Image: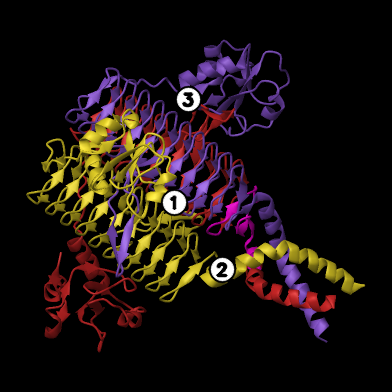
Chain colours: A red, B purple, C yellow
Amino acid sequence: MEKSLKEISDLVGGKISPEYESVMINGLENIEGARKGDLIFAVDPHIEEAKQSKASAVILPLNVENFPLPSIHVDDPRAAFAKLMNIFMPKLEIKPGVSDKAHIGENVKLADDVTIMPFAVVDDNAEIESGVVIYPHVYIGQYAKIDQNTIIYSNVTIREYCRVGKNCVIHASTVIGSDGFGFTTKNGIHTKVPQVGNVVIQDDVEIGANVGIDRAAMGSTVIGHGTKIDNLVHIGHNCKIGANCLIVAQTGLSGSTIVGDNVTFGGQVGTSGHLTIGSNSIFAARTGISKSMPENSFCAGFPIQSHADWLKTQAALRQLPEIIKKFRKIESELKK
Amino acid sequence: MEKSLKEISDLVGGKISPEYESVMINGLENIEGARKGDLIFAVDPHIEEAKQSKASAVILPLNVENFPLPSIHVDDPRAAFAKLMNIFMPKLEIKPGVSDKAHIGENVKLADDVTIMPFAVVDDNAEIESGVVIYPHVYIGQYAKIDQNTIIYSNVTIREYCRVGKNCVIHASTVIGSDGFGFTTKNGIHTKVPQVGNVVIQDDVEIGANVGIDRAAMGSTVIGHGTKIDNLVHIGHNCKIGANCLIVAQTGLSGSTIVGDNVTFGGQVGTSGHLTIGSNSIFAARTGISKSMPENSFCAGFPIQSHADWLKTQAALRQLPEIIKKFRKIESELKK
Amino acid sequence: MEKSLKEISDLVGGKISPEYESVMINGLENIEGARKGDLIFAVDPHIEEAKQSKASAVILPLNVENFPLPSIHVDDPRAAFAKLMNIFMPKLEIKPGVSDKAHIGENVKLADDVTIMPFAVVDDNAEIESGVVIYPHVYIGQYAKIDQNTIIYSNVTIREYCRVGKNCVIHASTVIGSDGFGFTTKNGIHTKVPQVGNVVIQDDVEIGANVGIDRAAMGSTVIGHGTKIDNLVHIGHNCKIGANCLIVAQTGLSGSTIVGDNVTFGGQVGTSGHLTIGSNSIFAARTGISKSMPENSFCAGFPIQSHADWLKTQAALRQLPEIIKKFRKIESELKK
């Protein structure tokens, strides 16, 4: 969508200098990210910052004068911008009801007001509660249960027996309940250990795109209430993640990792299996958690150190080439 | 599903003290993972361990007395537990046959007893052998072949010409045969090198969720007999993986990596391209394999070292801040 | 497909010794990757290399004599091989048109010559330009736009409002426009920040399998013209990637990373968020980019160093166990 600044000014009842009327706008942006073709808005205390923006135009309060970029002046820039967002990105229309192109298996329980889009599959004996939205190409396995008001985006798989709580959001192509990576090895041949448990996602959990959460060998892999998981995260079988954790992209938790509440894993963190990680801990990006950690840990590095020790170690490491040179010299002088 | 301990005891013909009859159970778990609401079982030598469990109740042999948790006593706890598993998780019913909601292309060869679920697509000239199970939203490309008794979970893509062997399991959202990452660069412009090979998955291979295995530029990317691959693994074009390897989650093998038999890659390992890795090798989690490795390697670290050297290096690194402080002191004293 | 060398020789009008006629061939390969059952071709200067190949047979120029492997001799080995490739891998037939098993929403604009395969969904108000090919199980969200001649493989999700340019290739199970990982935290509870922007993929971009690219919180996440992205890459919300970059597998760029043109990220690289990375930079595999970097950077390591410094640091690190041993000795002698 492309509109002239004049058209936009008219839409929001703004004031515009004639020389700016023909500036063309094709997107709305924030001050920092804006480029040519973008329109931003600015109010105090961000007026100065907006002067440096690469945006093509700015919506400003009425009283701002001598602004270096093309501008529209309005009474309430924030409200004007919100109005434009609805024009540039018209509201989505999610049609409630079960598409006649969806496949609903036998003995499925569907609440009255669910939304199930074309080519979604809800397999036999599954249960979908009130207000759930299921996008196309989602597969809900046998005996799985999705609780109220959860949104499941396209191409997600929820395997048999798994349970997803209320108000969850599961992003596209994520897999809940794939078999855990469990094998016994004899004479070099790996034999599958049956993975007969499930995954339980508690309420208010959000899970990013292309995540894999394995079902328990027995019992449940658990994602606790309010925990938020970013894209491309791996969670092994029998993990028990507490409430309100943050798990940043590309982190991998090995099987049977037990995590407390309010734990933050930065990006690309990894854990060895069968560890216990205490509540209220923070692990910096790339931490390799190779042993159990108490509550309130703040760690980094691989092998893992306290964050303070890691900073010292890394600072020391940078001096190492110089230190070794000097050491070799002193060593040879002392030998003489 | 929720049941009282009395109901459960009746189901397995157990003995139960009256004061435990109203304990409510909603899941079956192992001793280590159990929490409130879970039922576990314990037999020697795990009886002592079970006393510490957080389970709400335990199924025990008849002769165990004075157990601190609510319990049901039966002749064979393992058999009783197995019976309950079939009640808490009723057996899946996989209906054989080709769903009339699946799409079968032209000139496709289907064995008589395949299972193809709704909205799966088997494209023209593909071949599906006896006993194969294909879940919803799977795409089998033109001229692809899936051999006997292989299970392919939902949202998997098997691109054109690729071949999957017998008794394989491919988990949801995995991609077999995406184009290799091959480009020629001239004046900063990257031009695609056609990727006209395929992927060959040999028999008894299991591949986790959200894995990507690229087709060869020419010839085949090969995954050897009995190899098991965890979630979110990347395997570049023209890799040749031997038999009975284990590739743990989030590992990435660059293009043209040649791997022997019985090699284990821990989680989040990476390789440079065009390497040869000898059989019976083990690479610890996070190893960055930057050169070819002989058979029977046991390595870690990035850049890669023998595991023993890596341990020494890491131990030394932790002493470094103290050593540097002392060295600076000695250095200044010697100068005087 | 399996053919005897005699059959193959006849297909390409070649000359073959009688003793080689019964050699069986079931695939075509390159010299390096070939194994038993494979046929390769060789021309100068690769004739010598081909003598070491594990292929079962080789197609050679007429004038090559005394070759140690079974061979077919032809006038133009390359042309003969190309002919065989069309036989071993018959040309794909992509049928233009919109499958009557696809779901096309309301008010969708479809160019005349698009290909939309069974069970693809193009949601309301989306726009699909001329020559676009959409595989099964793709979901194109409301108001999304796909420009000319772009190919979108199976199980891909393009969420609402996102735009994909001309001549792009998006591989299977990739997600474009999932919500950014944005939350505000109060008293330990994480509350979602609405992610109301989109993703803009410019022309000539290729994106691998199982990639996740998050939509902007506001404005656009941008992938610049000609940039190529490998499998399992994560790109956070509001990233702006320049033109002609290469992003190798399993790399993760945190939110609001601003990248110039012609930047190469090796495999498994990570960035902290809100960084600016100058054009024409190269980051070795596993680099952890923890601060903004100028143009023409060539870096490695985590924390990041210049590549030269990283090499020095790593070389020094390997001497460290020995140095510490010697230092302890000197220290104790000096004390005496």
Q: Is residue A306 magenta?
A: yes
Q: Is residue C197 visible?
A: no
Quadrant assignment, res B150: top left
Q: Which residue is mark 3?
A: B2
Q: Name the outermost residue toward the right.
A: C336
Up-down relation of residue C319 to residue B259 (above or below): below
Q: Which mark is residue B254?
A: 1
Q: Which residue is mark 2?
A: C310
Task: Say what amino acid the circle numbered 2 marks.
Answer: Trp
Q: Nearer the viewer, residue B104 or A236?
A: B104
Q: Earlier in the sequence, mark 3 or mark 1?
A: 3
Task: Say what amino acid the circle numbered 3 marks.
Answer: Glu
Q: Residue at x 63, y 11 (%)?
A: B75
- Residue B145 placed where, x, y %? 30, 30
- Residue C12 placed where, x, y %? 22, 39
What residue range appears in magenta?
A284-312
Quick check: marks 3 and 2 in contact, CB under 8 Å? no
For residue C143, side relative to residue C66 (left or right): left
Secondary structure of the residue carrying numbered label 1:
loop
